[in-house]
């Protein structure tokens, strides 16, 4: 059972474009994280959001947690080739974490 | 600061062979996890240990066993490897506290069963 659905699954864009990745669930989570994973490595945390409606910015990345704490979005402004990677959302509840299937982003120079 | 360290990095097994993946964390975390990652499937939880001395099944525990040796170490054992267990395995840990919980991953172990 996949609790978290991410869309799109694949995304290929030109350098300088903007993009948004979505993470949706029917479950409520106490926290939601976004990770970025490069080939051959483990996922690395980008951000954790815990409050419904919360918005966090990390340079060109903007993260939003839905009001009902069931969904989240990641917006990248002016994408760069260094943003290429697999983006994973994860919902935390108690000691368990549930991961989305991921969005594979390719930014073409 | 090593964080989460897992070994081996790469392993090829024959069907029916056994092996143990080792994991250690130096962050004094209470909770530890083993995930497998397959194309199009995301990360799926195999087993987790909420605290030293406890272990629980995750989404896909069949064919695996775990041992929480102490607070630092959490091992994953394949008793009789099958080709379906070809995957990338990640160990992870967290503080275990409720709010703003963050999970930290090792670098992964690539396992091929032939």
Image (tube, grey):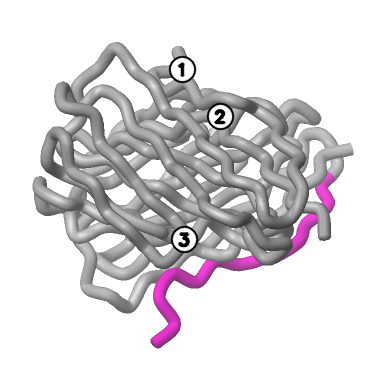
Crowd around label 2: few <14 · some 14–19 · many ≥20 (10 Å): many
Which of the chains bears the disc numbered 3?
A
Question: How dense is the environment of label 1, judged by Cα within 10 Å: few (below 14), some, or many (20 and up)?
Answer: few
Q: In the image, residue A105 lies at what x, y percent? A: 68, 44
Is A17 in front, or is B53? A17
- Residue B68 screen position, x and y as percent: 32, 55
Q: Residue at x 26, y 57 (%)?
A: B94
| Residue B69: image location, x then y, percent | 33, 61
Task: Kindly identify which numbered label has been placed on residue A107.
Answer: none
What residue would you read off at disc 2? A101
**Residue occupying image coordinates x 37% and y 63%:** A58
Mark 3 and mark 2 on one chain:
yes
Compared across the picture, whether B91 is left or right of A25 comes to right
The mark closer to the camera, 1 or 3, is: 3
Q: Which residues are magenta?
A: B1-13
Are labels 1 and 2 assigned to the same chain? yes
Chain for mark 2? A
Distance CA(mark 1)–CA(mark 3): 29 Å
Q: Is residue B8 magenta?
A: yes
Residue at mark 1 shares a chain with residue at mark 3: yes
């Amino acid at each position: 059972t996949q609790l978290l659905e991410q869309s799109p699954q694949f995304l290929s864009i030109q350098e300088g474009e903007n993009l948004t990745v979505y993470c949706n669930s029917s479950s409520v989570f106490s926290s939601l994280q976004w990770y970025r994973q490069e080939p051959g490595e483990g996922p690395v945390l980008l951000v954790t959001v815990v409050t419904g409606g919360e918005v966090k910015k990390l340079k060109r990345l903007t993260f939003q947690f839905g009001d009902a704490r069931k969904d989240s979005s990641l917006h990248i402004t002016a994408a760069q080739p260094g943003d290429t990677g697999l983006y994973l959302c994860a919902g935390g509840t108690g000691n368990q974490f549930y991961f989305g299937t991921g969005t594979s982003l390719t930014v073409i120079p | 600061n090593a964080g989460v360290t897992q070994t081996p990095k790469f392993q090829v097994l024959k069907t029916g062979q056994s092996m143990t993946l080792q994991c250690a964390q130096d962050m004094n975390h209470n909770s530890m996890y083993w995930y497998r990652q397959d194309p199009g499937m995301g990360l799926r939880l195999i087993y987790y240990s909420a605290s030293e001395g406890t272990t629980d099944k995750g989404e896909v525990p069949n064919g695996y066993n775990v041992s929480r040796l102490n607070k630092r170490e959490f091992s994953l054992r394949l008793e009789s490897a099958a080709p379906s267990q070809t995957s990338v395995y990640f160990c992870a840990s967290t503080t275990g506290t409720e709010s703003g919980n963050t999970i930290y991953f090792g670098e992964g172990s690539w396992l091929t069963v032939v």
